[in-house]
Image: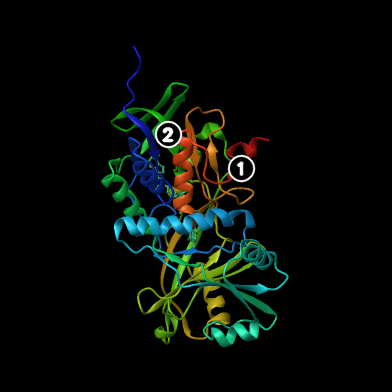
């Protein structure tokens, strides 16, 4: 007698990526179940801290642009389905020396994909955005298709919408083990167990702990987000102030317009403490966390008061080549890996979720994903 499978697809981890795979599968009419060790929208993983940058002209690689264009459409689709505002497209300014690889790749992106943009010299940029102390030897690329996403609300909205469409959710339910074979997958939680046809593992920084047999070369890196009061908050509203990103050799800083009418969030990208496990991320804030960010604020933002008023920790789950992981788990039948996302994945959540949903239902992925192949580390 053939075995009865309780769900078609299980999703382990309803965080930034898993929540969107859940919505996409429920939308496709698939009998889907999702698990999270906490309540979706929580602040223990990588999907919290008020805002996340969206940008399409992608300094990390031109090959990401088609995914970003599709993600931009899908963000609007979730908003349209739910009536919840998640993505504010107020534009973005990427700046740095003109021969910087990040800036060069941003320029290549806008030209290759015909994205709406404006290019300024440092002095011109200062006239347009006097809030930023651009340097004379810098250039700034302003991109229209950029802005910010509300991460906690997005995750909650995707999960809620997936539930409305018929998906099943178990919150505060850590999955302890996944046993996969050719016939299906057994999902083992503390007090229950399920048999499903396929599983999508989107457990972010917990993935090495959940699937140690894959020996994924992941590195967890603590990051700190810092908020500063604006002297003139009206200069930092989304209408007047774009998201910004200043990258150099993979390290840099970035920030957002005010969302509370008072404070502006600024953060460094990379350079954080490496830890072994999400539980080991030190959640306390130290002077040494704040000082380097405040130095950037003093150097670049004359209208911000360089005294931190709030700070929060988070962590990146890095890969050696800084590309995402998406695809079949090597040696584990019926298991799709959706992440980790190498510290820059939030903006991609809807398209990553859609492609993972396609893979888990034996469909051809909407877009090219070979650079994310999980087996690339074994070659
Ligand atoms: C400070 C900071 C700033 C960032 N800024 C940006 C930005 O501006 N733009 C951008 O695009 N990206 C940004 N990123 C990156 C982006 O946020 C991450 O790439 C993305 O959140 C990773 O998503 P994820 O789903 O892999 O992980 P998570 O969102 O952490 O989700 C993993 C989920 O799995 C659950 N889970 C884990 N193990 C289990 C288990 N065994 N059983 C059940 N559930 C489990 C966890 O509870 C969690 O909910 C930033 C990241 C950080 C930390």
The quadrant holding residue 50 is bottom left
- Relative to 42, 139 lies left or right: right
> Secondary structure beneath disc 1?
helix
Name which residue lies at 59% across and 40% down.
373
Q: Which mark is residue 199?
A: 2
Q: Nearer the viewer, residue 144 or 160?
A: 144
- Residue 370: give its label: 1
Give yes or no for contact between labels 1 and 2 (Cβ–Cβ under 8 Å). Answer: no
Callout 2 environment at 10 Å: few (<14), some (14 to 19), or many (20+)?
many
Spot the residue most to the top: 1
Q: Position of residue 290 (x, y in %)?
A: 50, 71
Describe the colour scheme in one phrase.
Answer: rainbow
Above or below for 162 versus 221? above
Mark 2 falls on what kind of element?
strand
Q: Quadrant of residue 108?
A: bottom right
Q: Is residue 51 above or below residue 155?
A: below
Asked whether mark 1 and ligand 1 are closer than 8 Å, the reply comes as no
Residue 366 in picture, x, y percent from top left? 52, 45
Location of the C terminus by quadrant is top right
Query: Viewer-nearest of labels 1 and 2?
Result: 1
Q: Is residue 182 left or right of residue 117?
A: left
Crowding at label 1, few (<14), some or many (≥20) Cα neighbours within 10 Å? Answer: few
């Amino acid at each position: 007698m053939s075995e009865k499978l309780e769900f078609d697809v299980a999703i382990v981890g309803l965080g930034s990526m898993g929540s969107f795979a859940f919505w996409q599968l429920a939308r496709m009419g698939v009998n889907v179940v999702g698990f999270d060790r906490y309540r979706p929208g929580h602040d223990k993983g990588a999907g919290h801290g008020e805002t996340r940058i969206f940008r399409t002209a992608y300094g990390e690689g031109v090959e990401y642009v088609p995914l970003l264009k599709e993600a931009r459409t899908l963000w609007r689709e979730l908003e349209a389905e739910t009536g919840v505002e998640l993505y504010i497209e107020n534009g973005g300014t990427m700046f740095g020396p003109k021969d910087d690889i990040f800036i060069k790749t941003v320029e290549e992106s806008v030209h290759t994909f015909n994205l709406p943009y404006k290019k300024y010299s440092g002095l011109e940029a200062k006239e347009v955005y006097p809030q930023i102390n651009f340097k004379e030897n810098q250039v700034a690329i302003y991109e229209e298709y950029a802005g910010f996403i509300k991460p906690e609300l997005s995750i909650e909205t995707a999960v809620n919408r997936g539930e409305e469409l018929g998906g099943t959710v178990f919150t505060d339910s850590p999955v302890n083990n996944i046993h996969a074979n050719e016939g299906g997958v057994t999902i083992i939680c503390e007090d229950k167990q399920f048999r499903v046809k396929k599983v999508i593992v989107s457990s972010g920084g917990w993935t090495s702990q959940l699937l140690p047999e894959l020996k994924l070369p992941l590195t967890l890196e603590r990051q700190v987000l810092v908020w500063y009061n604006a002297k003139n908050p009206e200069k930092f509203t989304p209408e007047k102030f774009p998201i910004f990103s200043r990258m150099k050799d993979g390290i840099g800083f970035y920030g957002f317009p005010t969302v509370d009418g008072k404070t502006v969030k600024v953060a460094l990208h990379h350079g954080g403490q490496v830890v072994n496990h999400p539980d080991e991320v030190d959640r306390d804030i130290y002077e040494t966390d704040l000082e380097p960010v405040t130095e950037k604020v003093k150097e670049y933002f004359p209208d911000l008061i360089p005294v931190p008023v709030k700070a929060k920790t988070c962590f990146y789950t890095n890969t050696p080549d800084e590309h995402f992981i998406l695809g079949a788990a090597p040696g584990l039948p019926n298991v799709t890996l959706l992440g980790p996302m190498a510290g820059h994945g939030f903006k991609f959540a809807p398209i990553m979720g859609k492609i993972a949903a396609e893979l888990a239902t034996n469909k051809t992925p909407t877009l090219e994903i070979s650079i994310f192949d999980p087996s690339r580390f074994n070659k």
